[in-house]
Image (cartoon, rainbow, N blue to C red):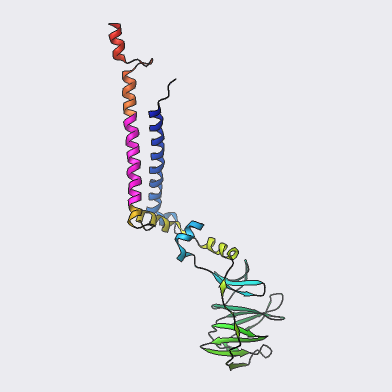
Amino acid sequence: MTINFRTLISKFLFICSSVLLLTLLVLGLMHNHADILGLDKRTISTPAIRQMYPEQFPVVKGIKAGSHWYYPFEDYIYKDELPWQKCDGLFVGVVNLDKVTLLICNTEINLYDKYEQLIDKMTSSYGLPIPITRVGLIKNQLFVESQGLTYNLDLESMETFQAVIDDQVRWQRAELLPAMYQEPIHEEKGVSVKLLLAELFGGLFSGILGIVLIDLLLLFGIFLCGVFIKDVMYSKKDKASTGDDGIPNELKVRRDQ
C-alpha cells in the first residue's frame, strides 16, 4: 500500500482552511448580531485582556485601618474580600477607635460597635460639615476636612464641631489594594464580547494592520480551499486514467494489442 503524501497534505490544508474560515464566519455572525445574542452583557477578563484594556481595569485603592482593608465596590464598602456596609455618598475613610468603628462618607459618619452593629449616624443635622473630603487623627481625636477647613469632632457629645488649624493631623491616604483583593474586582468587570468582536473586525486592536490581518487570513483560507479542490480534481483524473493495479490504461491497451 503506497502513501500519497500529496493527498495527505491536501487534506491537512483543507482541514486547516475549513477551520479558519468557519471560525471567522462564526465570529462575523456573532459580531453582526451581538445585540440579539446579548454579547454586550457577556464579559471576558484575563491577564492578557487586562493588559490590552488598562482603562477598563483601573487601579483600585482602599484604606487600611488596623489589619483590615476597606474599599468601595459596586454598592458596598468591602472589608477585605467581603461586603461590609453601605455608604450614603462617596467613601472617604474608616477609623477604628477603642470601642467603635467609624465609617466616614462625604455626607455622613456611621458609628458601629465591636459587633459591627450601627450605633448612630451623623449627618449635617448634627452640624457635620459636608462634603467631607478627608479624615484624620491626633491620638484619639477625630478630624475631618470640608471645603478647605479642618474640624475637630467631639465623639462624646457628637454635636460639637470646632474649626481648628493643626498641622499634626495624620490624614488617611488611599493606598493600592493588594492583588488578592483586586483580582475579584477585575474579574467581575471584564470587557464585553461585543467590544472585542468590534475591535477585531474593525482593526482597533492594531489599527490598519488588524484589518489587513483579517483580510490575509480570509484570502489564505480561500487559497487553501482552492489548492484542495485542484488536488481532488487531479486525483479523480488520475484514477480515471489508471487501473486498480496502478498501471495506466493506455499502456494496458498497447500491451493487449
For residue 227: magenta?
Answer: yes
Residue 65 figure quarter: bottom right
Does the image show residue 75? no
Q: Residue furthest top?
A: 257
Q: Is residue 32 above or below residue 84?
A: above
Q: Measuring from the top left, give residue 205's x and y in whole percent.
A: 39, 57
Q: Residue at x 35, y 50 (%)?
A: 213
Q: Who is closer to the viewer here, 38 or 127?
A: 127
Residue 68 figure quarter: bottom right
Q: Residue at x 42, y 59 (%)?
A: 195
Q: Is residue 147 above or below residue 197?
A: below
- Quadrant (top left, top right, bottom left, bottom right) of the N terminus: top left
Q: Measuring from the top left, give residue 236's x and y in whole percent.
A: 33, 24
Q: Is residue 158 left or right of residue 106?
A: right
Q: Is residue 142 above or below residue 70?
A: below
Q: Residue furthest front?
A: 168
- Quadrant (top left, top right, bottom left, bottom right) of the C terminus: top left
Q: Magenta region, mostly helix, strand or loop?
A: helix
Residue 225 figure quarter: top left
Does the image show residue 239? yes
Q: Who is closer to the viewer here, 95 or 112?
A: 95
Q: Measuring from the top left, give residue 183's x and y in whole percent.
A: 56, 62
**How many badges with numbers are in the image?**
0
Q: Which residues are magenta?
A: 212-231
For residue 115: magenta?
Answer: no
Q: Measuring from the top left, give residue 241's x and y in whole percent.
A: 31, 18
